[in-house]
Image (cartoon, rainbow, N blue to C red):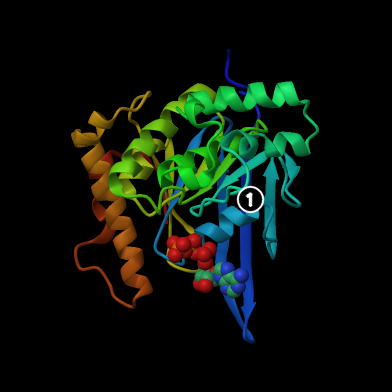
Amino acid sequence: MSAPSMNGQGGHIEVRDLDISFKARGATVQAVKSVSLDVRPGEFVSLIGPSGCGKSTLMNAVAGFTTADRGALTLDGRPIAGPGSDRGVVFQQYSLFPWMTVRKNVEFGLKMKHVPPTQRETQARTLLGLAGLLAFENHYPAQLSGGMKQRVGIVRALATSPQVLLMDEPFGALDSQTRSVMQEILTNMWQRLRLSVLFITHDIDEAIFLSDRIYVMTARPGRIKADIKVPLPRPRTPDMMDTPEFAGLVRAIKKLIREESLAAMGGELRDGGYAGLSTEIGPEGVAHVL
Ligand SMILES: Nc1ncnc2c1ncn2[C@@H]1O[C@H](COP(=O)(O)OP(=O)(O)OP(=O)(O)O)[C@@H](O)[C@H]1O
């Protein structure tokens, strides 16, 4: 049985000059400012940055949950005007229906799209197999661990064969051991499905392990501070985390984020900030630094 096709060609997210602000208690909060970014078809891209810098706001705009004040947002050239089944979304909180079995949860989106029952079942079982969950297809969410629930959430988001998967800190609620297993499962699934992923995390190791590129954001209002390529080969394996290349990337990204976190708290760096960035990861690894 082969995995459902996730469209090897489509899934190009383009964000251009995006501004998003919120009105709260008479004041305007500028969350995102002049952000431009791309997630190319089949690319795994992470967004990382200090707390409150606008990562979720940006992802919500790509998901179609939030509207922008200015700028353009397209998927394969079509303007994003609201949520759609071409974009699967996974949040930190497990959003499974507790009264449905694992398989029925996964089949839900397909049912909404009037996919016939046999096809629904085949698609759900194929993806559950990829996530190592087939033995649990008739369990209810309450019978699953946190890691398993989140795997079901990912499978559910993938069930309708979206071109893009949007993941907002999906492993943030998991313990570190479960989290690293989940990272391995996700990278293996991505390797098979090759769909475009936009992934938010606070965890630098996680961003590097999973991504082709990482956008580092500034403190609020969030702008793109750096666009960093991850030159590690695919498929990714946990032993890559012990290499000097990995350690260099961690140091470089840590510096960028620390500078922003300090700026957000009114401090400043005394060690040159990201001046040493290209010595850490090589000039070709740094596509853009503000
Ligand atoms: N619906 C809203 N109404 C008012 N302000 C909002 C709203 N959503 C977000 N904000 C504000 O916009 C800014 C960016 O928030 P956002 O959640 O996008 O940041 P984040 O980078 O995802 O944060 P974290 O890393 O802590 O999850 C914050 O100052 C937040 O308080």
Q: Residue at x 27, y 31 (%)?
A: 238
Q: Nearer the viewer, residue 9 or 5?
A: 5
Furthest toward the right, the residue is: 114
Image quarter in which the N terminus is found = top right
Q: Nearer the viewer, residue 71 or 159?
A: 159
Q: Nearer the viewer, residue 28 or 174?
A: 174
Q: Residue at x 43, y 66 (%)?
A: 219
The image quadrant of residue 13 is top right
Question: Where 80 falls versus 2 (above or below)?
Answer: below
Query: Label 1 belongs to which residue?
Result: 62
Q: Residue at x 62, y 40 (%)?
A: 105
Q: Nearer the viewer, residue 272 or 9?
A: 9
- Callout count: 1
From the viewer's perspective, tell me whether residue 132 is left or right of residue 115.
Answer: left
Residue 282: percent from the left, percent from the top? 28, 38
Image quarter in which the C terminus is found = bottom left
Q: Is residue 219 visible?
A: yes
Residue 178: percent from the left, percent from the top? 33, 42
